[in-house]
Amino acid sequence: MKEVMLIQCSFPCETYSYASGGSGMPHRSKNGHPKNEAGQQASKNLENIINIMTEVHKQNDNVFALIENPRAGSFRKSWEVTKAMTTGPWRLYKTSHCSNRDHELDGPATAANATMWPQKDTVYLAINLPEGADETHLKTCSRDGCMMKNEHNRHIAQIMTPPDNTGDLYKVTKARKAMIPQGEVDCLMRAHEDHLEGKDEAHPWCTVCGKEYKKEGEGSKKGKATTKRKRAEEPQATTSASKPMQGLLVCDEPGCKNAQHQECSHMKAESAEPWYCNHHQMDHNGIHKHHRHAPGINKPKRSQGRATHKHHRHVPKQRAGGKENRH
């Protein structure tokens, strides 16, 4: 599994597409709920694919997983996609095939050769893409425009037969309709590479006390090298308020970016053993027996928050004559 780099799936859209409603036998509601056997089977298949890709990601944290489907459908609203996004590492991104076409990678686009790209807005359910990749790396036709339109601002290549053809419009073939531009694939891979470059960067500050990593006589360091753990070379940390503490340790939990000073940690750093931040240390070792408070946080006094007597109660007052005074 460590050698797997990319898993891509263009899931069949027949049961998710809103166009299926025109056949008189819609497979789903607008919210993606299956209404017949075909829709139910497609939901099971999609859930199985998501589960398989998620399991591969657990064994290979850097794998790039993609599931593509048209935006004009209930795919992004279906419960299987919603579940994947709320309980797993999946995120949803939108783009347009026509906008991401690249002249060098996809070749010339001409109406004469029927190589124009239609306006096909699509979504990707993906693992290991940066947040906001559909704004920083991918293009959409409505926002960025494209070169696939005529002088009337209509796409020359059409998914369906145009009812009011101006003479230069044509319907793309079924094979062409299912194709993804190489320019779009290139944009996705570049976004994935940028995500991996920033993925290994830990926080350049302590997640407990908030002080940044600084060396003697230098300003704050930012970047990958500031938080790479080299315990043997770490300078002695200090809790002096006049000088920032040094020597950040990076959590060994896969995917965790937390960095802490030794003084702020519940767990001692041993060169031959993995070290975990306060959050994941509890997951691995339970609550530490020798819990230490971070610098600058005073321990509560034993008398604070405690009543004077554990079983304190008032004694009923008595009236003259020995009767209780109830009030």
Image (cartoon, rainbow, N blue to C red):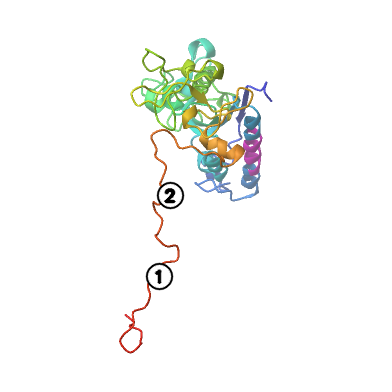
Q: Mark 2 Cα within 10 Å, few/some/many (few <14, many 20+)?
A: few
Nearest the eye: 38 or 283: 283
Expressed as whole percent of the image width and height from the top left, the position of residue 226 reads 46, 17
The C terminus sits in image quarter: bottom left
In the image, the segment drawn in magenta is 44-53
Q: Is residue 244 above or below residue 289?
A: above
Looking at marks 1 and 2 on the same chain, the residue that comes earlier in the sequence is marked by 2
Which quadrant of the view contains residue 243? top left
Q: Mark 1 Cα within 10 Å, few/some/many (few <14, many 20+)?
A: few
Expressed as whole percent of the image width and height from the top left, the position of residue 282 reads 56, 39
Nearest the eye: 77 or 3: 3
Q: Main secondary structure of the magenta part?
A: helix
Furthest-top residue in this view? 104
Identify the residue shown where x is 40% and y is 52%. Answer: 303
Q: Which residue is mark 1?
A: 313
Which residue type carries mark 1? Arg
Q: Which residue is mark 2?
A: 302
Expressed as whole percent of the image width and height from the top left, the position of residue 180 reads 55, 23
> In this view of the protein, can residue 234 be seen by the observer?
yes
Q: Is residue 39 magenta?
A: no
Which quadrant of the view contains residue 42? top right
Residue 110 tag number: none
Q: Secondary structure at mark 1?
A: loop
Identify the residue shown where x is 40% and y is 20%. Answer: 150
Q: Secondary structure at mark 2?
A: loop
Which residue type carries mark 2? Arg
